Amino acid sequence: MRRWMLVALIATIVGQASAQDLKIRDVFKQMPDSLMPYLTGNNRLDFIDFMDSNMKASVSNQTGGNSEMTALTDDSLSIRMSDALRVDMMLMNLDEPVDSIRQVIVFVETFLTDTIYGESVCKIYTVDWQPVTKDVPFNEAQKSRLSRLNLQNILKWDDDKLNNS
């Protein structure tokens, strides 16, 4: 009996440690195709391989256009899906768990309209891609990061509009 309890305790500790070691690339690889139908699983793997090789991370997407991963860090990524859609993802550790959830994926789709401002939709998922339906208690640094992302989307779109005019 003690042996089983020891094995269960070790498995719990290892599980908690490995959850904290997750990187955005790990959850991006496992993302369901339905959440980003523009891209196949192989497209997502290619993005990561290209970025790791310091190459331009551009792939042909499911609509016949090109999508480009423009940034990849341990906890975030950014993809220009098309001229009208940008996707940003961030993996965030929670100071206060929601139920037993200690990490969440913030998935932001910014739809670029004819105006200079994009319309962003933010969704929150667990690391196994289940929607989080409860309010997530982001700390001040995380709230600031999300605000900067929104501002960056506005400024990037504004810059693109000015340079293409």
Image (tube, grey):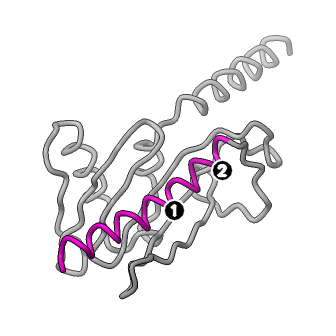
In which quadrant will I find the C terminus?
Answer: bottom left
Residue nearest the observer in this picture, 96 or 129: 96
- Asked if 162 appears above or below 32 in the picture, the reply is below
Q: Position of residue 157 (x, y in %)?
A: 35, 70
Q: Which residue is mark 2?
A: 143
Location of residue 50 by image quarter: top left
Q: Amino acid at mark 1?
A: Asn
Q: Is residue 99 left or right of residue 52?
A: right
Residue nearest the observer in this picture, 77 or 151: 151
- Asked if 51 appears above or below 153 in the picture, the reply is above
Looking at the rendered structure, the secondary structure element under dot 2 is: helix
**Contact check, label 1 and label 2, Cβ < 8 Å:** no
Q: Position of residue 22 (x, y in %)?
A: 52, 35
Residue nearest the observer in this picture, 162 or 59: 162
Q: Position of residue 62 (x, y in %)?
A: 25, 76
Magenta residues (range): 141-165
In magenta segment, residue 103: no
Badge number at residue 12: none
- Asked if 124 appears above or below 62 in the picture, the reply is above
Location of residue 69 by image quarter: bottom left
Between the residue at mark 1 and the residue at mark 2, the CA separation in whole angstroms equals 11 Å
Badge number at residue 150: 1
Q: Amino acid at mark 2?
A: Lys
Counting residues from the N terminus, which is met first, the one under dot 1 or under dot 2? 2
Q: Is residue 155 left or right of residue 145?
A: left
Kindly identify the residue that appears in the image at 64 percent across and 29 percent down.
15
Q: Residue furthest bottom?
A: 114
Name the magenta segment's main secondary structure: helix
- Mark 1 is surrounded, within 10 Å at the Cα level, by few (under 14), some (14 to 19) or many (20 or more) other residues, namely some
Q: Position of residue 72 (x, y in %)?
A: 34, 44
Kindly identify the residue that appears in the image at 63 percent across and 52 percent down.
126
